[in-house]
Amino acid sequence: MRKRGGWLRAIWRYTPAVAPLLIVLVAFGVRFHELGTQSLWNDEGNSLRLAQRDVADLVDAAGNDIHPPGYYLLLKAWTGLAGESEFSLRALSALEGVLAVAVTLALGRWLFSRAAGVVAGLLVALSPFAVYYSQETRMYTQLGLLSVVGMALFVAWLRRVQAPKDEKLPPTMLFALGLALCNAAGLYTHYSYPFTMLAQGVLFVGWAAWVWQRERIPGSSLPTPLRQALVSFATLNVVTLLVFLPWLPTAWDQVTEWPTTGEDLALGTQLRTVFTWTIYGSTTDAQGWLNFLWPGLLIGVALWPEQKTRRLPHGWRVGLPLAWAGIVTGALFISGAYREANLKFLLPVQIALALLIGHGVVRLWQIPSTETLRRVPLLKPLEQRYIRYLLAGVCPFLVVIGQLNALHNLYNDDTYSRSDYRAMAAEIMSDPQPGDAVILDAPNQVEVFSYYFTGETPVYELPPGLGGDDEATRRLTEDVIAAHTRIYALFWGEEERDPNRVVKATLDSSTYPVSERWVGDVRFAQYAVRADTPLIPVDARFGDHIRLTGYALTTESAAPGEVFGVLLRWETDAPLTQDYKVSVQLHAPDGFNVWQHDSAPVNNLQPTSTWTPGEPVLDRHGMFVPLGRVPGEYRIVVAVYADSRLLVTVDGSAQVQRAVDLAPFTILAP
């Protein structure tokens, strides 16, 4: 008769034999799912345009970037074979992500056990953090791949160093050379890779100390295996540096001169975000501290001493992912580079934590009854065993469920969609008119915008160069305004290139804003250039202090599909603490609101809380006449609101209104 629990052991015994292939297939599926659905975004356009250059020009251009040229050179070779569609461009990263899962399976097996590698591989395969960057034409998945390959080669090399001579393993030098070249490729991929090399160095010192303690003979020199390992490790690192030496001066300049863009947040907030992204994914819903109990328990169990003797000591083996994760994460914090946009540098950390969790699952399942849990006085050995089985199953299950929810968000929640340059370009090209122009602020957007935009409309890149000359930017923006009647503007990355918002301020003060919306992290706006007309005096008081003292319409009639401007002159007779919005509306004869433009004054540039008493504020609003409107007499209505509308009195009248009926407006027949 089979012992109780035998069927569980059978499942556990045979599943690891086929699980690695299934996990690799899962990794392939989730990374290639909807791979080409979304538009390329800004940084992906940069990658493409660099890859399209000839090799010498590519390397030279990478010298002005914050990334070394390794990924771009590989992408150039890849696109020569696979083409330049969105799917093809991203397929390189997707394949690298699948390879990272496969290597994680191997590294987990070498460090701990086949089952531990399977659990770790599953967590990396389903990680929304890893999947997100596996679906992006950037170098971050390659960073993760080379980091885990480097660690796997490092472990394989140390195992071979310690192996008896009769073991049939590849020569030590083969692993050493592979590690040297892998580390060089990592340096050419991303400037955070040296921290993985630093972790290798720390781990090598720890291993050497263990070997010295175990094999030293009092009064003798270094043991021969240790002396050979020291020479080999020093040599492979020299080889790495020699391969990277041609790029080292450029790398030094880029790393030391690039501005620091980190966020000053509490350490607890930073750690919580890091653990959320690396365990549950970057697209997960908010996770409370309780959700870290399950992975925390498994990591804690992984650290529990192991009685079984292996070639590398247990403390060193669990120390590898700990040191790896700690050094890479600590470097991000200490360098002042912490911000959400830079958490992609932590893809190696996600792999390291998966290895610890995978080992913890297996340790919890396999801990003998003679160890820790036998000390629980109220539980019998059999009860303790099933509690361990339950925890070993439930804890990783809860982590995987969290990952699957975050994967659902990644595929279905527009919050996590990349900026849709494809849609913005299509909208501009759908209704071309004489006098149109497109402004890209910041200018490097042109690399992705031109991938989709094939129209004849002039495209202006502002501010020029890397920015910094506000007066030149203002003049160039005014030149665009003078030459065109409708301007589309795409605002992205202004903090670095146009920190004083000169392009937007010039457009808002000289043209009529018609519409504005966020497309991902790009603000997509449309402006109308219209000649101003004389202001017509009016006396309308909104609330206690805000006065509308004049208005002007750029025209008193327009046909459907046309745009006209409304200019308002505001004043306050006292400082204001509340920020209000202005709503300019076009009402049909029956009072139906057919179009409105709402914003804080001057298109959000001069909130009411910044107004100076007695100083006029000129506030422009662009109004679009919707297609299909019946010709006739319409009305221009103005309201001011925060949580609710301010009540209005006109010309000192005692009659209180909720809005001002400002002027008639005629919609003409098409």
Image: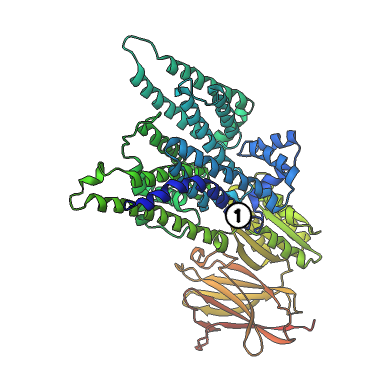
User: Measured along the vertical axis of the image, is residue 305 above or below residue 118?
Assistant: above
| Residue closest to the far left | 377
**Residue 218: x, y in percent?**
31, 12
Q: Residue at x 63, y 58 (%)?
A: 34
Quarter of the image with the C terminus is: bottom right
User: Measured along the vertical axis of the image, is residue 115 above or below residue 237?
Assistant: below
Number of marks: 1
Horizontally, residue 290 falls left or right of residue 18, namely left
Q: Quadrant of residue 481?
A: bottom right
Residue 335 in view here: no
Front-lying residue, 624 or 290:
290
Q: Quadrant of residue 559?
A: bottom right
Q: Quadrant of residue 533?
A: bottom right
Front-lying residue, 510 or 350:
350
**Residue 354: x, y in percent?**
45, 45
| Residue closest to the far front | 1
